[in-house]
Image: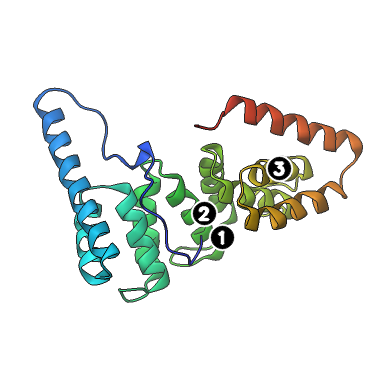
Amino acid sequence: MTDQKIDARVPSDTSKTGPHTTGDSGNQAAHARRSAEECFDRGLQYDDAGNHVNALEWYRKAADQGYAVAQVILGWHYHTGEGVPQDDAEAARWYRLAADQGDAVAQQSLGCVYREGKGVPQDDAESVRWFRLAAEQGRADAQHDLACSYRDGNGVPQDYVQAHMWYSLSASQSSEAEWANRAKNRDLTAQRMTPDQLAEAQRLAREWAAAHPREP
């Protein structure tokens, strides 16, 4: 989880609301989804204009309809206290609502919440569970967090092979600014490994990357 504001302009498919339905209920769901998207877009317009109070009002309308990206943004605002009273429990509540829909940003943020024990009881195993869900979707931050959990044995048995694998995957899709730290952690972990362990970690990383090709 980061204090840097979340970029909501690139929502994934997991930001859509609710299950697929048919018939009249499907039409109602589609109408509600459009309304949520419209509310969210209005929030973006106010944000771009510098009117953050009104932006939050529209994000909340979208979030109340189950729009995951808006829920993540509200969680971030409660986490940082920007525009609303700082409230860790409320941040965790909004992150969970989005995470339960499969939103990777929310899943990683919820993992941080459980790791730090902010707004929820501290729970390393629950933290790892959420990091893993986001990491398996290809979120680099979560892959790095999961690697750290394996390296330190927090919430999982210490496993340098898994740590190196996830560090490698995270570094491979990181920005230039993030790459140096993640590659450093990978290389420091490698120093603790046998040649056979290192070969296994590299194989696992290649296989995972081949099974999860990035979208162009």
The amino acid marked with disc number 3 is Ser
Amino acid under disc 1 = Arg
Element assignment for label 1: helix
User: Quadrant location of residue 94?
Assistant: bottom left
Element carrying mark 3: helix
Marks 3/2: CA distance? 20 Å
User: In this rendering, would 104 be left or right of 69?
Assistant: right
**Residue wearing tag 2:** 111
Q: Which residue is mark 1?
A: 115
Task: Relative to 15, say whether 112 is above or below.
Answer: below
151 vs 105, left or right, is right
Q: Residue placed at 83% from the left, 33% from the top?
A: 199
Disc 2 is placed on an element classified as helix
Q: Amino acid at mark 2?
A: Gly
Give residue 168's mark: 3
Disc 1/disc 2 C-alpha distance (Å) = 6 Å
- Image-quadrant location for residue 24: top left
Characterize the local packing of mark 2: few (<14), some (14-19) or many (20 or more) Cα atoms within 10 angstroms. Answer: many
Q: Are marks 3 and 1 in contact (CB under 8 Å)?
A: no
| Label 3 or label 2, whichever comes before in sequence order | 2
The answer for how far apart the CA atoms under marks 3 and 1 are is 22 Å
